[in-house]
Image (tube, grey):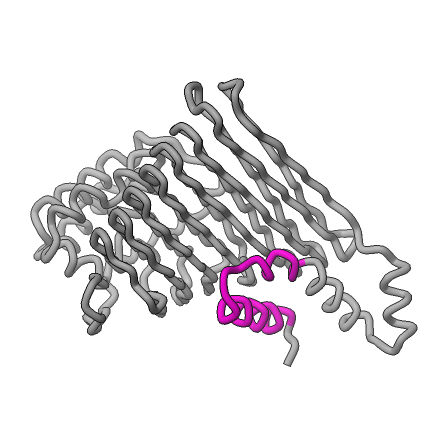
Amino acid sequence: MKPDLLDQVRVATQGQPDWLRKKRQLAMMMAQKLPVTDHQQTVLKKWLQNPQLDIDDEQVTTTPDGYVNLPIFIAAQQYPELVQENLMEKAINWQANQLNALHLAFLNGGRFVYVPNNTVVDQPIELHATVSGCNYHNLIMVGANSKVTIIENEVASDQQPSYLGTELLLGDSAQVNYYQSNTFTADHNWESVRAYQAGDSLLNIYSAFFDRHHLEADYHANLDGDGSHANFKMVGIATHDQVQDIHTRIDNHGLHTDGEILQNGVVKDQAILNFHAVGKIYQGAHQSASNQESRLLTLTAASHGEADPVLLIEDNDVNAGHAASIGQVNPDQLYYLQSRGLTLMEAEILLTKGFLLPVIEKFPDQQLRDQTINELLERLEVQ
């Protein structure tokens, strides 16, 4: 690790709250002692060669009464206790690996969303930003008995590998519908969404992986409180020489917790799309459930992927199961569609839509379904 990088972080954090400056500098100093994977090395090498420390200039937008939506650096000044206690501490852990530590040290921007206890937000909170820096982080806190829908569509426009991180912290009996579909510019990117859930909370995550670049995605819910429930529904497409590694995990710690993962993906050309799903029920999490289903459709002989389901069960009184399949498109189907006047591309598009729509149709409302279908058609280059 270059010694001058710490000096650059010191300069970049001037004017920020003292606790945040010290935390980011500590992350810089500790990073080299933390573990790192091969894929993380690809991202880190470019960061360390040319760190991007300029802060995204986000405006403070007016929000309806009842909740807070601020740029994260402004929130660190206006809500110091909330941000200090929770930023990369309970969901995305900055000390877990070298990439997370440097994500904090090189932080460029993000949003802080805080929905107080007993608040129902009728309109979706939309997080739309064109992110010029590499390290953008959303900290979302939803209080007890509150209910909200959050839509995240962000564009990471930097040529350096980008890390878009989102933390979701749910209080007792909170209900959150979270939709995400981000777009990247760099060749290699990282996306992490991690949640910490208190008792009887409900988190529904709906994600569309329609970007065209290499992506490592990390989705993880920690069902800490009794009766909490996490539900992941995901669709993805990989084409050309693209590699997408999608890691999903739900940990059942509390009693009567329920984790469900459903993901469908389509891969063609020489692309690779991998679904790695883990459900873990810890000892003492009686009468909990962990179920997952991962399915891949390959459209060309050179394309491939993995559907890798893992169940780790430490308690007897539970309900757990998984299903996984990888299948090639049926040549007879393609022939039939082409015999009815469709081109090969049109036939592949029709089969792709048919494979992904059963998951998209489970998205919570018509607006989100229509938006995802439009993104799918754009990804397939259908005008």
Is 213 situated above or below 319?
below
| Residue 33 rendering spot, x and y as whole percentages | 30, 30
Q: Is residue 119 magenta?
A: no
Q: Position of residue 248 (x, y in %)?
A: 50, 41
Q: Residue at x 70, y 58 (%)?
A: 355
Residue 197 x/y as whole percent: 34, 40
Work out whether residue 41 can be spotted.
Answer: no
Residue located 41% across and 67% down the image: 155
The quadrant where residue 282 appears: top left
On screen, residue 232 versus residue 324, left or right, reads left
Quadrant occupied by the C terminus: bottom right
Q: Main secondary structure of the magenta part?
A: helix
Number of marks: 0
Percent of width and height locating residue 268: 71, 58
Q: Is residue 359 magenta?
A: yes
Q: Along the line of sight, which residue is nearer the eye, 28 or 277?
A: 277
First to last magenta residue range: 356-380
Q: Residue at x 20, y 73 (%)?
A: 62
- At x 40%, y 56%, the residue is 162
